Image (tube, helix red, strand yellow):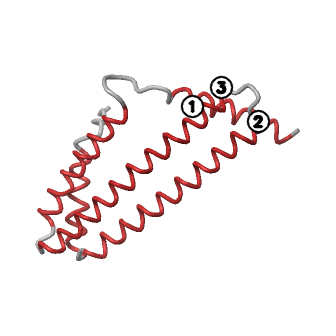
């Protein structure tokens, strides 16, 4: 009984969240927008690497590692979409059990953790290629670039 009191609100919340993901709001598909953003981000990162890493061979290796990170992110998006499709199908199935929902959500959670672990490994691979000063310069340049995309804070 206790489990049902916890599980039912969790399932309702999940259903509402999943329902909100059913379509992209705006022009074009979410997939094409995301793909364009990733490609734009990769181009910007390549520029930052060129500016901060002086050794051409190290810069080439760093860019390849950044590309590996982008590829992992793309795969993660595809897998997330597949999990959403499974949840949509379960949601449409009147006979679906809480255990079926939990199984898909557990699988999704495990895959997300595996993906973030791979990305973290690539981050440390990138860091190992660079000197402490190059890493500092690169991360500062990334922060500066990222701030251009962040909403401006309103002053009081």
How many residues crowd around disc 2 within 10 Å: few (fewer than 14), some, or many (20 or more)? few
Task: Identify the residue at horizontal 76%, vertical 35% (top origin).
Answer: 97
> Can you name the residue that lies furthest to the right here?
1
Q: Earlier in the sequence, mark 2 or mark 1?
A: 1
Give the structural element (helix, strand or loop) at label 2. Answer: loop
Q: Earlier in the sequence, mark 2 or mark 3?
A: 3
Q: Position of residue 137 (x, y in %)?
A: 19, 65
Which residue lies most toward the top here? 26
Of the numbered discs 1 and 3, the one sitting upstream in the chain is: 1
Residue 92 disc label: 3
- Circle 3: is it few (<14), some (14-19), or many (20+) Cα within 10 Å? few
* Residue at numbered disc 1: 17
Q: CA distance from mark 2 to mark 1?
A: 18 Å
Q: Cα distance, mark 2 to mark 3?
A: 12 Å
Q: Is residue 78 left or right of residue 26?
A: right
Between the residue at mark 1 and the residue at mark 3, the CA separation in whole angstroms equals 15 Å
Disc 2 designates what residue?
Answer: 97
Decide: is 148 above or below 26. below
Q: Is residue 94 above or below residue 133?
A: above
């Amino acid at each position: 009984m206790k489990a049902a009191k916890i599980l039912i609100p969790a399932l309702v919340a999940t259903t509402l969240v999943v329902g909100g993901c059913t379509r992209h709001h705006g022009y074009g598909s979410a997939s094409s927008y995301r793909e364009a953003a990733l490609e734009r981000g990769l181009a910007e990162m390549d520029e930052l690497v060129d500016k901060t890493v002086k050794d051409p061979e190290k810069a080439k290796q760093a860019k390849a590692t950044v590309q590996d990170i982008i590829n992992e992110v793309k795969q993660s998006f595809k897998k997330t979409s597949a999990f959403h499709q499974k949840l949509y199908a379960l949601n449409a199935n009147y006979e679906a059990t809480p255990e079926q929902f939990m199984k898909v959500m557990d699988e999704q959670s495990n895959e997300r953790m595996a993906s973030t672990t791979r990305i973290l490994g690539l981050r440390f691979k990138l860091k190992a290629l660079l000197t402490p000063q190059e890493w500092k310069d690169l991360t500062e340049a990334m922060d500066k670039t990222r701030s251009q995309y962040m909403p401006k804070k309103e002053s009081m």
